[in-house]
Amino acid sequence: MIHTLKEIYGAEAAAIQAERYSAAAAEFETMFGQPAQRFFSAPGRTEVGGNHTDHNNGCVLAAGVSLDVIAAVIPTDDGIIHIKSQGFPMDTIDTADTDIKDDEENTSAALIRGVVADFKRRGYNVGGFSAYTTSNVLKGSGLSSSAAFEVLVGTILSGLYNDFSVTPVEIAQISQFAENIYFGKPSGLMDQMASSVGSFITIDFKDPSKPVIEAIDFDFAKSGHRLCIIDTKGDHADLTPEYAAIPSEMRSVAQFYGKNVLREITREDVMSNISALREKLGDRAVLRALHFFSDSERVGKEAAALRSRDFKKFLSLINESGDSSYKYLQNIYPSSAPADQGLATALYLASDILDGEGACRVHGGGFAGTIQAFVPEEKLSVFKRRMEEVFGEGSCYVLSIRPFGGTEVIIK
């Protein structure tokens, strides 16, 4: 749970990151009038496989990425948590008060208080600290900046007051509790787990209260590829009905059989009654259910390809996942606005540039926002240039898979 800059970011980026941490330390001292004593980091995450499968108790492949939230920290003995995040007002939380505050819903203060509450509920120690945080995790990009912040707070409390005895899985569960109960967002566990554990992980949500998490030992830095997230600058406003329809339609197929989620039935159940399902629920619900089964099963194949170091097979499976999302899940453009097809345009451009190499797929919830691409290093400069010609300067983010989740950082 303690790593150096070189271990976390790689040798090439370590010097740049050292400047970033030094800047955070300087801001901390300006804010709190004393030097920071310790530093912490938690990464954003990317969904790699299993698009819209977690909410029906399926399987997901996710990974921590090189973008992160960092904190300069000093413990205090007054039981008060002060967190000043760059660009935002100071949050002040009394660790003795863990009551849910209605006026804190949808705020970072709610996340902090929720993390403290679940630490105490699980019997762990809590205490005060002052922190200055800064983030380069892109908001609205599907990289989950809120999960990184929650995991950061949990990692700080684990390090300062529990000798890092709180496991990464527990920190993820605590973070989800904070987001669900205190912040008011009914999110799944994938975001927090990928941020807390880091590297590639699979998550099986068959029992959501006890998800099965497996880490995958794969050094992405040696794959010869870079991970790119392309922001198509699509507007997420008014898309809530589009997102909500996916789990609702999937569950309607399960409910046809008297079940609650698709994980409780099989693909064969759907295929054997496809005519009746089409008549009652419509084609889209049936197709989305079939996507669920194929993409959830594909996660195991993707993990196996990584473990066997068959990166070519892995890329082929990523393309299959993207194809299934496009054809059957149908979350590439909103049905309410068929003229707005930024994701489809980005996928076409990516496929054209990659020309049979690498892989690309929708990233995250879909309909607007981002796509994901695994780009051969020799094509990276061309790929980035052409994507930014269409979607604007800075729209193509070049990332790497981070080998660690939430951690304390040694900056010297």
Image (cartoon, rainbow, N blue to C red):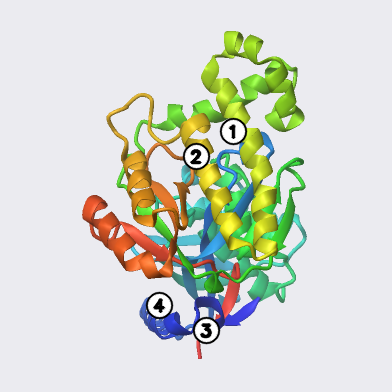
Whole-angstrom CA distance, mark 4 to mark 1, is 44 Å
Alpha carbon distance from label 3 to label 1 = 40 Å
Give the numbered dot on residue 6: 3
Q: Nearer the viewer, residue 376 or 335?
A: 376
Q: Nearer the viewer, mark 2 or mark 4?
A: 2
**Which residue is most to the bottom?**
412
Inter-mark Cα distance, 2 to 4: 42 Å
Q: Which residue matches tag 2?
A: 323
Where does residue 101 sit, x and y in percent of width and height? 54, 45
In front: label 3 or label 1: 1
Is residue 375 shown to the viewer in this render?
yes
Q: Secondary structure at mark 2?
A: helix
Give the SS element for disc 1: helix
Residue contact at pointers 3 and 1, CB within 8 angstroms: no
Closer to the chain start, of discs 4 and 3, is 3
Q: Residues within 10 Å of mark 2 (few under 14, many from 20)?
A: some
* Mark 4 and mark 3: Cα distance apart in space: 18 Å
Residue 306 image position (x, y, % from top left): 65, 61
Q: Look at the picture and state if 125 lies above or below 61.
A: below
Q: Quadrant of the N terminus?
A: bottom right
Q: Nearer the viewer, mark 4 or mark 1?
A: 1
Determine the secondary structure under disc 3: helix
Amino acid type, mark 4: Ala
Residue type at mark 1? Answer: His
Left or right of 69: which side holds 263?
right
Measure the C-alpha gap from mark 3 to mark 2: 37 Å
- Tag 4 residue: 24
Q: Are marks 1 and 2 in contact (CB under 8 Å)?
A: no
User: Residue 111: x and y, percent?
Assistant: 54, 53
Sequence order check, earlier mark of 1 and 2:
1
Labelled disc at residue 291:
1
**Crowding near the residue tagged with mark 4, few <14, some 14–19, many ≥20 C-alpha atoms within 10 Å:** many
